[in-house]
Image (spheres, rainbow, N blue to C red):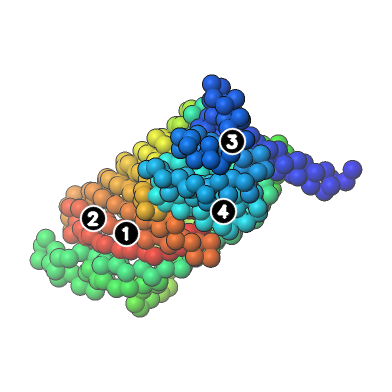
């Protein structure tokens, strides 16, 4: 059999296995939440109950009966029962949306099913069964970003490692059927201080601070596009190549930024996570005339401590060359760590830490830096998702800063808050508003500043 046909056969089997896997998971969750060994026989018997007797049953039992009807292909009968005897308890609205979504899904009315499931999750993001059905529906309709988003939340909050593994296998199938990854964004970017300049007018020795060193507000445009392709040369082994372009533009050209980037990585998955090693490069045009080249290797490790806790670390080393400011040429080594804890399918807590060492040709520009922070992903009622992050960074320079007679020391606070309206579906995208605040405190007046910024973009991961 030719290699191309073998690969296609293996891929097809992998997707089919994943479909059966998620189907098994959905059935298992349904059994856990809707049935028990004690009442399974009574529910089966109740499915044959006349509508007169059906109306007299407790609402939880009526719900279980209609779920059983839908799962067994009797969705038309379930719809008639639901219309004749609507649910009325405190959870009735979301239960009705769920049943209507399941009926639409069986009928392959996937747009309606997606809308019903999203509406139920918008009201109560803790509905695990609804999230699982939504993930499956999004996969069927090839909305892979959304499907993967919900599958990752389900996996990280799964009650057992075995169940988490089932979701992970389905995530692998989503990745396998879509080797190409394309993304783009364009946003207005208002900022109270896009120059990152100081509010002071004079230096400590009485000098006048002017020009681009002073704070300046404005409304800019930021955007970009990124593409990647994943090869699968072997089991649990992949090669990822990518390229992108990102830009930022404000009034004038002094603070314009244009970056082209490329990367290639070899990724090896294993039982407890994955390891990736690769190399990246970038070409940057900063301001009017400065050209900056960077490149070097990187190593990242993902370790699943258990099915709810994951640790990620990334180590990078870059060589930097400036076309004009060649005194800044040198090397930068960074390490970034993230510990994520899934508290629920709608809540993830993060702990952040990292460090950086930069060397140049001038001692007073060489520095050590370290940071720590926390973040929270939380889905709220009314279809609102918030991601909030706070980070504190300390930076210490090696040599005496000119005019300061001592090494520069900076302390910086960064706060990010992102809000996504996940029940507002616009051509498969949801609006996201990002607010960014930064404040830098320093013994150098030129590095004392604060800034407020914002972006409004659209996302597929909702």
Of marks 3 and 4, which one's residue comes earlier in the chain? 3
Front tag of 2 and 1: 1
Q: Dot 2 corresponds to which residue?
A: 439
Residue sitting at 42 percent across and 41 percent down? Answer: 126
Residue 160, image x, y percentages = 52, 27
Q: Dot 1 corresponds to which residue?
A: 435
Q: Identify which residue, 448 or 419, lies in the foreground.
A: 419
Q: Dot 3 corresponds to which residue?
A: 49
Could you classify mark 1 by the number of other residues whose Cα lies within 10 Å: few (under 14), some (14-19), or many (20 or more)?
some
Residue sitting at 61 percent across and 30 percent down? Answer: 44
Q: Identify which residue, 90 or 184, lies in the foreground.
A: 90
Of marks 3 and 1, which one's residue comes earlier in the chain? 3
In the rendered structure, the answer to whether residue 335 lies left or right of residue 372 reads: right
Front tag of 2 and 4: 4
Query: Farthest front residue?
Result: 52
C-alpha distance separating marks 3 and 2: 67 Å
Q: Is mark 1 on a helix, strand or loop?
A: strand
Residue sitting at 56 percent across and 42 percent down? Answer: 51
In the rendered structure, the answer to whether residue 72 lies left or right of residue 353 reads: right
Of marks 3 and 2, which one's residue comes earlier in the chain? 3
């Amino acid at each position: 059999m030719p290699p191309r046909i073998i690969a296609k056969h293996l891929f097809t089997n992998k997707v089919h296995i994943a479909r059966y896997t998620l189907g098994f998971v959905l059935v298992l969750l349904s059994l856990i939440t809707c049935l028990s060994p004690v009442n399974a026989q009574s529910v089966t018997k109740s499915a044959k109950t006349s509508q007169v007797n059906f109306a007299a049953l407790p609402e939880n039992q009526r719900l279980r009966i209609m779920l059983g009807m839908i799962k067994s292909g009797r969705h038309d009968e379930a719809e008639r029962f639901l219309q004749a005897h609507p649910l009325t308890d405190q959870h009735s609205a979301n239960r009705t949306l769920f049943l209507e979504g399941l009926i639409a899904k069986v009928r392959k009315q996937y747009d309606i099913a997606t809308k019903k499931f999203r509406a139920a999750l918008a009201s109560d993001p803790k509905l695990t069964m609804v999230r699982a059905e939504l993930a499956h529906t999004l996969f069927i309709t090839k909305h892979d970003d959304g499907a993967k988003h919900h599958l990752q939340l389900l996996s990280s909050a799964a009650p057992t490692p075995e169940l988490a593994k089932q979701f992970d296998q389905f995530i692998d199938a989503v990745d396998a059927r879509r080797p190409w990854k394309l993304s783009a964004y364009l946003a207005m970017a208002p900022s109270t201080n896009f120059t990152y300049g100081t509010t002071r007018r004079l230096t400590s020795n009485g000098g006048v601070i002017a020009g681009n060193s002073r704070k300046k507000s404005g409304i800019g445009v930021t955007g970009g596009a990124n593409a990647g392709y994943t090869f699968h040369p072997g089991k649990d082994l992949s090669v990822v190549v990518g390229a992108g372009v990102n830009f930022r533009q404000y009034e004038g050209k002094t603070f314009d930024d244009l970056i082209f980037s490329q990367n290639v990585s070899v990724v090896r998955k294993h039982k407890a996570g994955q390891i990736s090693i690769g190399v990246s490069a970038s070409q940057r045009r900063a301001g009017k005339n400065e050209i900056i080249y960077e490149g070097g290797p990187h190593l990242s490790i993902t370790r699943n401590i258990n099915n709810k806790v994951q640790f990620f670390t990334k180590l990078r080393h870059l060589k930097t060359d400036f076309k004009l400011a060649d005194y800044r040429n040198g090397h930068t080594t960074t390490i970034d760590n993230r510990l994520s804890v899934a508290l629920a399918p709608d809540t993830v807590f993060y702990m952040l830490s990292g460090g950086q060492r930069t060397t140049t040709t001038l001692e007073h520009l060489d520095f050590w830096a370290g940071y720590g922070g926390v973040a929270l992903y939380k889905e709220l009622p009314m279809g609102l998702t918030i991601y909030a992050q706070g980070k504190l960074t300390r930076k210490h320079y090696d040599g005496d800063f000119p005019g300061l007679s001592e090494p520069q020391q900076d302390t910086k606070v960064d706060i990010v808050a992102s809000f996504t309206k996940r029940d507002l579906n616009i051509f498969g995208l949801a609006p996201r508003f990002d607010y960014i605040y930064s404040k830098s405190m320093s013994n150098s007046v030129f590095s004392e500043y604060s800034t407020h910024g914002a972006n409004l973009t659209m996302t597929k991961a909702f």
